Amino acid sequence: MDMMASRTAFVDELTKVNRKLRTMFDARVKSQGLTLARARLLMHLAKEEGATQSELAEALQVEQPSMVSLIDALEKKGFVVRRAVDGDRRAKGIFLTDVARRETDTILGYANELRQQVLGGVDGRDLETATRVLRRVALNIGAVA
């Protein structure tokens, strides 16, 4: 396969895999009454609890107004609370509630299960190479954007 065909095949496969993974994950979190975006936010907060709206928007690569809507929706469900950030009266940190922690544990468990299923049979060295390639692609995208 020539270089152009290889590049085309890679991007096509990457697009298909991304779409399928999102569809699988989305179907699972919908059974918990969540959207993909809300589940992603909960998973991020499980690792970075207390992050501000702007930090979350940047980390999840969504616009500020979209992040406000996501947080508002999770707050209405009783999954998150906003608390003042020390040293900045205007900023609010976003924290999980106990209910959200239980939901998030379930989501994280499913994400791990999904990773095991979709990466079954992939050699560790191949996975490391693929990860390096994807990181390079992400850097290239960042340079173009």
Image (cartoon, rainbow, N blue to C red):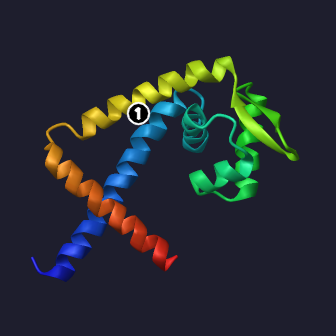
Compared with 5, 98 (above or below) is above
What amino acid is labelled 1 in the image? Ala
Residue 59 versus residue 10: which sits nearer the camera?
Answer: 59
The residue most toward the right is 89
The residue most toward the front is 87
Where is mark 1, residue-wise?
111
Image coordinates for residue 12, horizontal then vertical, percent: 29, 66
83 sits to left or right of 125: right
Badge 1: few (under 14), some or many (20 or more) residues near its Cα, within 10 Å?
some
Taking the spot 49% from the left edge, 28% from the top edge, the residue there is 107
Q: Quadrant of the N terminus?
A: bottom left
10 sits to left or right of 105: left
Residue 3 versus residue 131: which sits nearer the camera?
Answer: 131
Image coordinates for residue 118, horizontal then vertical, percent: 26, 40
Image-quadrant location for residue 16:
bottom left
Q: Secondary structure at mark 1?
A: helix
Residue 30 versus residue 122: which sits nearer the camera?
Answer: 122
Taking the spot 33% from the left edge, 29% from the top edge, the residue there is 113
